[in-house]
Structures are given as structure tokens and as C-alpha cells.
Amino acid sequence: MTPQVPGGPVVRATGLAAGYGNRVVWEGASFEIDRGEFVAVLGPNGAGKSTLLRMLLGLNRPVAGSLEVLGATPRRGNPAIGYVPQARPFESETAFRGVDLVRLGLDGHRFGFRPPWEWGSSSGLSKRALSQAQIAEAVAAVGATAYATRRIGQMSGGERQRLWLAQALVGNPSLLLLDEPLANLDLRNQAIMAELIGELAHSRNLAAVIVAHDLNPLRQVVDRVCYIAGNGVAIGTPDEVITTEVLSRLYGAPVEVLIDSRGRRFVVGIDEEIAHPHANHELLGR
């Protein structure tokens, strides 16, 4: 059953600040995310991108300001949120299958992987209430039907990512959060996965928020970007945010954004290998 959620924005932040203890990671973020919208969270390593996801999941509290998810304070285990964690390895001989991974999305373990021997009762749906039709529909939605019964450890990285995505979708969420799902995928599969997520956000009218290191695989499918750097946040369309002026302001130092003949954007001039570790290679080799 689709969770009942109130009207209005899926996410609303006002003067939001994130941090740990007395340390503020970033501050001054005010934005809304609506249903059907695909938003990319970008920025250098350590800027606090994943921290934003943890706040939306109710795992971290704001240091300042206010944050609402579906009209309420974020809480752990919200069934209206689907979550795709960072990729993790599987042993090639594990008996755990793709459909077993997807089934966890209905078994109450939405925000992390637990092996079959740790399954038990939870606040989610009981095993008896699991819907094979829901699982099959989620698997089909990500194009994984042909291999969903294979062992997870014998799948490619792209195939496993599709099944993590199916797990997040199986409960028909209103908000989809994805933590670096493009990492460790080749350029072709990055583009395919980005396009799939965008299509799902728009066709299912759900809000999707993806953490990524590089705009380029996403630039043709995201509606807006949230760039976090230098303790600040800028939000808008890619053309509005990924500019020399905006990024120079965020970093507090001169930054140049270069645009090639294919419309791809590259940030140069400050900690380049940290902010965009693939930018030099793409500029020179593609």
C-alpha cells in the first residue's frame, strides 16, 4: 500500500545547518523539493553531502534551522522513504539472490542490509504479508526481471545497483534517497542509471535526491542541483549553480567552470582532484 502523505513539498528546509558536536559542516540552506523532482547533491569529499541524506532519514538532527519531510520532523524508518545505500561487496558464492534483496524493502530493513539469518519481526510488514506482486513489479520497474533470481555475488555492479533501487521502490515511497549509486560504475552505466532514476521520479511522481561526485552523468536528467562546499549551499538548475561565479563564492576562492562542446561542465582551479577526481581525465581523454 502506498504510504499516506500530506500535500505540499516532500522536503522543506529553512535556514538549515548540519554538523557534528560543535562543528558546523554547512549552514544557511533553505529549499523545497516537490514530488516528481530529481535533485542531485554535489560537492567535494567531506563537504557534508551524505550528512544531508542522514538528516532526511532522521539519523542526524539539524544544528540549526528546520527540516520537514512529508510535512513532519524526519524520523527513522519512515516507510514513505526509499533508500539506496552506498554500494557494498558481496561474496561471489553467497546464496542471497536479487529477489531476496528486494524483499528486504518490505521486511522493515529499508535503511540497511541484514543477512537472512538476522531476519525477524519488525515494525515493517510481516513475512506473511509480503507481496510477490509488489516485488515483481519493483524488479520489472528497474529492468532486472531477467536476472533477479541469480545470486547477488555473481552479478555485475550495474545489475546489483538496479536491485538496490528495486528494494527502495518496493514500498511505493514518496521520497527516494540515493547515496552515490553511480560510484564504481563505468561511464555508460552511470548514464543509464541516472536516466532510469529520473524516469522513475517523474513517472511515479516521487521526489528523488541523489548524492554524486560528478554532474556530467546527471546533467541531462536532473531538475536541480544542490552544491555543498566551503560550509555553504547553493541550489538551482545546473546552469544556475555550476558557474564560475557561484562556485567561487561557495569555495571562497577563484574557481573556473569550463563547458566543452558537448555541454559537459568541469570545475578547475581549487583542489581539483578532491572536488572532481575524474575531471582531468575526461577533459584530456574524451
Image (cartoon, grey):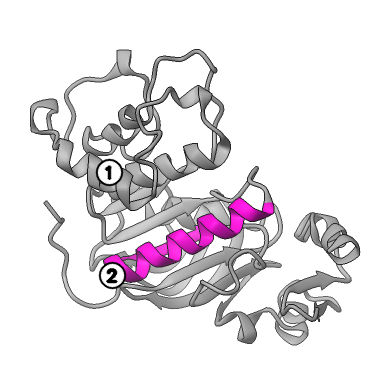
Task: Classify 10 Å Cα crowding around label 2: few (below 14), some (14-19), many (20 and above).
Answer: some
Q: Is residue 210 magenta?
A: yes
In the rendered picture of this protein, how many numbered marks are placed on residues?
2
Tell me the residue that label 2 is attached to: 205
Indicate the amino acid at tag 2: Asn
Q: Is residue 124 visible?
A: no
Magenta-drawn segment: 187-211
- SS assignment for the magenta stretch, majority: helix
158 or 37: nearer the eye? 158
Q: Is residue 92 visible?
A: yes
50 or 239: nearer the eye? 239
Which residue is at 63% across, 85% downward?
239
Q: Looking at the image, is 39 positioned above or below residue 285?
A: below
Residue 57 image position (x, y, % from top left): 37, 51
Residue 118 image position (x, y, % from top left): 31, 16
* Front of the two marks 2 and 1: 2
Task: Classify 10 Å Cα crowding around label 1: few (below 14), some (14-19), many (20 and above).
Answer: some
Residue 46 - label: none
Answer with mark 2 or mark 1, whichever residue precedes in sequence.
Answer: 1
Indicate the amino acid at tag 1: Gly
**Does residue 68 appear to the left or right of 86 in the view shown?**
left
